[in-house]
Every structure is written in C-alpha cells, then in structure tokens.
Image (cartoon, grey):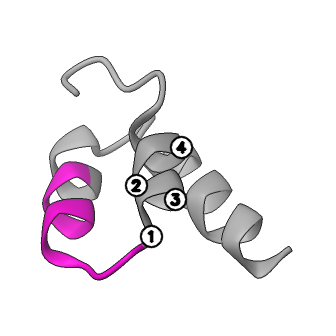
Amino acid sequence: MIKKAIFWSLREYGKTNVAAVIEYVSHSDLKTLSKKEALKNLTNA
C-alpha cells in the first residue's frame, strides 16, 4: 500500500513538474515497479 502511494504521488506531482520527478526517480533507490509506475504517462519521460 505504501509503494502504491509513493508512485501515485510522484505521478501526480509529475503533472506539474516532470523534470523533478524524473530526477528524483533516477537518483532514488525505488524498486523497479515503483520507478516504472512513477514515470508512467509523463510527457517528457
């Protein structure tokens, strides 16, 4: 449930600041699925 909340919030934040989400995901130690879901539907991803 926590993992889902993390990538959901990143995906929502990506609607306003795509670059920040991409940078955070690339420098974090998130699991592969969380990274994939966080970057899902981002315009610059």
Residue bearing mark 3? 34
Q: Secondary structure at mark 2?
A: helix
**Amino acid at dot 1:** Lys
Which residue range is magenta in the image?
22-30
Residue reaching furthest to the front: 32
The numbered disc on residue 31 is 1
Q: Which residue is mark 2?
A: 35
| 24 or 29: nearer the viewer | 29
The image shows residue 42, relative to residue 26, as above or below, that is: above
Report the number of numbered marks.
Answer: 4
Dots 2 and 3: beta carbons under 8 Å? yes
Categorize mark 1 by other alpha carbons within 10 Å: few (<14), some (14-19), many (20+): few
Is disc 4 placed on a helix, strand or loop?
A: helix
Q: Secondary structure at mark 1?
A: loop
Q: Residue at x 52, y 53 (%)?
A: 33
Question: Which quadrant of the figure has residue 6?
Answer: bottom right
Q: Residue at x 30, y 82 (%)?
A: 29
In the displayed structure, would residue 4 be above or below residue 19? below
Q: Is residue 43 left or right of residue 30?
A: left
Of the residues shown, which amino acid type is indicated by label 4? Glu
Q: Are marks 3 and 4 in contact (CB under 8 Å)?
A: yes
